[in-house]
Image (spheres, grey):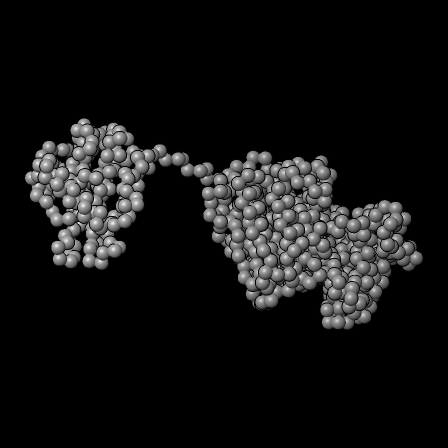
């Protein structure tokens, strides 16, 4: 090793145009007597082994600030010279930057012989300072291909083995480096480069979407009176009380897709985009096959969603945790990212459903972009260890105000079906998942229903005519057993019912109780048909009286503003005196029976929950007898025919020829009941009979009977179901057509994307 003493310090240049960056030399450090830190060696002092041309190239971009050759600001020639340094010349410069000079300062004017002597002395000092380290590993120049990064100068440090010796590590001279090409940023839609809670952007254009709005479909409003004619009051102060059913029906957008396979295969891509939050219970009781089935079911849901749909995952046990943002189910990076999140779910801890639901609502609120549809799907298998009633009510109210339906699933026999039903309310749904094997089908039916949403925030507007519009006074008295949020004017002039989101093929029926006084029609007047139009001012022309009008306001998926329909008007007349009383309208009687039965089932559940299973069974037996009388009166059956119909509908069809649907259809045909009505009333009688068995004993109640009856009550009350049991012992009443289609495809375990 040959070291050359450093040159004398050079005074800074006084040239104001010279802005060449120079290496800052640290101030001298104080140390023990006889030891003086030395400045960094000059490039020229350590390049004795290089060629003159190489030394010139190295020195050019690193000339000291006192260089006598003036240079302009930012000279392009210096940049070119820096970029033209060869690899061998760069190696020499790196060698110069890594050399360390120790010992006392030497004179600036030195000959070649004195340089050699000084180099030998400096080399000796280095060997003494580093000891055996250099003996075992002689110093080598750094690799040429990958220059090492030298740390900045630090304070003097002690050399091992010599407590009294201090050396100073000077800063190396910076060398110009070639700028490496920068790779272009990844596409903005790629989920691989997003944070765990970052939302994927929504798909800006969705040209293939077919909604009720862009094909010109609106909700169908119908008003059906309980009786075709009304009895005339005896005086102006005596009123007539009657009922009417106001119905809101949503047609299927593509009528040719009512077949299950067709709607499942071709419908998904044509549905509007969805933002859904999956809220999963990962408490200790969810371990084993339960959680494994949920992971598999979520994977299947991702496979049937489209690239424009987004899913976010929230888990909860003792606390809630959001595992992903809203990730697009694009079949590539997004699907892999969601699958990794599913795999990270582990079962441990307690249960706090409240925190899981709160986290889901916060995720929906914090979105910067929103798809047309939003929903929460929540699954739990246990009781909430931190149940807070008022807090739950506040969250449910908040979700309803933000147009976010909640769909809940109770897993196993130990879940809190009462709480889950309350969370779902009348605008979502509660589903009992009895076994892990049916989780996938239940999820698929729910997703199919949500994706087929036709109208959002549907509100039914009911109005009685004013005195200036009708010669009689009509007052809305009540909306009996109405499960939806509703408001009734104190004077009985109007009422509004909030129905929420409606799926394709769904229908909502509201019973309205009316009081009519001050007759103004001639005794020979006859009623008009249900759902007639008009403004109520043509009584003199056709002899009919306007008694009620109804319309709906709603939001289509391709618009943000609410639309309001032209009202549909119900007109009736007075019955002719002396004529026999007419039978009540079968449809209105059926709807009254449905609502009364739901209320009766709920009352029986309360008795069973209090431990009075005998009382619960007796209440359901009485409800069944009342239902038979109502059916006989509505359809003109005698007691024996009604009893035969009920017996056929409630018979055990296990092992028989055909399923329960075929049995009920045959019984309805034999009794002369229309097929559509026969399916509904037959399924209702069947559920009442099943509830008697499931609530009559403590064992049956605790072994799943409570959950089954709760699900049944919710279905009859809200006219909604997103799943039907796979056996042949139940009817898919109130399950939307696309919900049935998605469930049917799931049961075949077809894992390809729908659409």
Q: Is residue 562 left or right of residue 194?
A: right
The answer to whether 674 is drawn above or below residue 317 in the figure is above
The answer to whether 286 is drawn above or below residue 300 in the figure is below
Q: Is residue 598 left or right of residue 176?
A: right
- Give the percent coordinates (x, y) of residue 706: 73, 63
- Give the percent coordinates (x, y) of residue 51: 19, 29
Which is more toward the observer, 690 or 684?
690
Which is more toward the observer, 725 or 678?
725
| Label tally | 0
Which is more toward the observer, 210 or 85?
85
Q: In this orientation, does residue 41 appear?
A: yes
Q: In this orientation, does residue 400 appear?
A: no
- Give the percent coordinates (x, y) of residue 457: 59, 51
- Give the percent coordinates (x, y) of residue 28: 15, 52
**Position of the N terminus by quadrant:** top left
- Give the residue displayed 85% in from the left and 51% down from the top: 654
Q: Is residue 519 left or right of residue 488?
A: right
Which is more toward the observer, 713 or 1?
1
**Position of the C terminus by quadrant:** top right
The answer to whether 493 is drawn above or below residue 534 in the figure is below
The answer to whether 130 is drawn above or below residue 96 in the figure is below
- Give the residue displayed 66% in from the left and 36% down from the top: 266
- Give the residue displayed 80% in from the left and 49% down from the top: 728
Quadrant of residue 626 in the image? Answer: bottom right
């Amino acid at each position: 090793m040959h070291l050359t003493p450093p040159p004398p310090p050079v005074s800074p240049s006084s040239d104001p145009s010279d802005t060449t960056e120079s290496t800052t030399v640290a101030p001298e450090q104080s140390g023990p007597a006889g030891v003086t830190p030395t400045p960094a060696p000059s490039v020229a002092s350590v390049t004795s082994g290089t060629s003159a041309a190489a030394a010139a190239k190295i020195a050019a971009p690193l000339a000291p600030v006192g260089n006598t050759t003036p240079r302009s600001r930012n000279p392009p020639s210096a940049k070119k010279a820096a970029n033209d340094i060869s690899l061998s010349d760069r190696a020499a410069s790196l060698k110069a930057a890594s050399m360390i000079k120790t010992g006392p300062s030497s004179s600036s004017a030195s000959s070649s012989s004195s340089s050699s002597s000084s180099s030998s002395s400096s080399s000796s000092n280095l060997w003494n300072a580093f000891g055996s380290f250099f003996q075992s590993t002689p110093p080598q120049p750094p690799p040429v291909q990958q220059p090492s990064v030298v740390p900045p100068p630090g304070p003097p440090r002690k050399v091992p083995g010599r407590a009294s010796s201090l050396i100073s590590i000077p800063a190396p001279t910076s060398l110009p480096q070639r700028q490496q090409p920068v790779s272009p940023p990844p596409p903005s839609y790629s989920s691989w480069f997003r944070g765990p809670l970052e939302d994927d952007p929504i798909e800006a254009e969705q040209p293939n979407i077919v909604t009720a709005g862009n094909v010109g479909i609106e909700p169908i409003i119908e008003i059906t009176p309980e009786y075709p004619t009304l009895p005339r009051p005896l005086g102006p102060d005596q009123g007539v009380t009657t009922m009417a059913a106001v119905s809101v029906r949503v047609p299927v957008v593509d009528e040719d897709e009512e077949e299950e396979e067709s709607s499942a295969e071709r419908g998904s891509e044509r549905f509007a985009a969805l933002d859904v939050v999956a809220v999963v219970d990962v408490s200790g009781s969810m371990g084993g096959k339960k959680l494994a089935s949920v992971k598999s079911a979520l994977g299947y849901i991702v496979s049937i969603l489209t690239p424009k749909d987004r899913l976010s995952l929230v888990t909860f046990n003792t606390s809630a945790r959001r595992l992903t943002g809203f990730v697009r189910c694009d079949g590539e990076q997004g699907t892999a990212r969601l699958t990794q999140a599913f795999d990270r779910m582990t079962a441990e801890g307690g249960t706090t459903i409240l925190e899981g639901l709160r986290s889901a609502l916060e995720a929906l609120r914090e979105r910067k972009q929103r798809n047309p549809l939003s929903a929460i799907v929540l699954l739990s298998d246990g009781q909430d260890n931190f149940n807070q009633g008022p807090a739950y009510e506040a969250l449910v109210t908040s979700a309803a105000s933000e147009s976010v339906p909640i769909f809940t699933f109770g897993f196993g026999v130990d879940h809190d079906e009462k709480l889950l039903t309350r969370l779902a309310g009348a605008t979502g749904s509660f589903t009992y998942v009895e076994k892990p094997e049916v989780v996938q089908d239940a999820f698929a039916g729910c997703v199919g229903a949500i994706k087929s949403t036709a109208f959002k925030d549907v509100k039914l507007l009911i109005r009685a005519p004013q005195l200036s519009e009708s010669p009689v006074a009509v007052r809305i008295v009540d909306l009996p057993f109405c499960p939806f949020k509703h408001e009734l004017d104190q004077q009985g002039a109007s009422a509004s019912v909030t129905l929420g989101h409606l799926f394709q093929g769904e229908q909502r029926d509201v019973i309205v109780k009316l009081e009519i006084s001050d007759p103004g029609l001639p005794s020979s007047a006859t009623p008009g048909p249900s759902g007639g139009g008009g403004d109520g001012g043509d009584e003199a022309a056709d002899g009919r009286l306007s008694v009620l009008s109804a319309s709906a306001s709603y939001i289509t998926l391709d618009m943000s503003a609410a639309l309001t329909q032209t009202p549909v008007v119900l007109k009736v007349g007075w019955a002719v005196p002396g004529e026999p009383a007419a039978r009540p309208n079968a449809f209105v009687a059926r709807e009254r029976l449905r609502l009364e039965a739901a209320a009766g089932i709920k009352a029986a559940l309360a008795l069973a929950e209090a431990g009075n299973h005998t009382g619960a069974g007796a209440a359901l037996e009485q409800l069944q007898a009342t239902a038979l009388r109502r059916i006989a009166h509505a359809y003109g059956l005698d007691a024996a025919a009604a009893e035969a119909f009920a017996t056929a509908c409630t018979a055990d069809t296990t092992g028989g020829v055909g399923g329960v649907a075929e049995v009920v259809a045959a019984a309805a045909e034999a009794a002369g009941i229309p097929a559509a009505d026969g399916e509904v009333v037959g399924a209702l009688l069947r559920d009442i009979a099943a509830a008697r068995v499931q609530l009559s004993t403590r064992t049956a109640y605790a072994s799943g009977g409570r959950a089954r009856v709760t699900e049944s009550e919710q279905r009859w009350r809200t006219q909604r179901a997103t799943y039907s049991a796979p056996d042949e012992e139940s009817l898919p009443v109130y399950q939307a057509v696309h919900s049935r289609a998605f469930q049917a495809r799931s049961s075949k375990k077809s894992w390809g994307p729908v659409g």
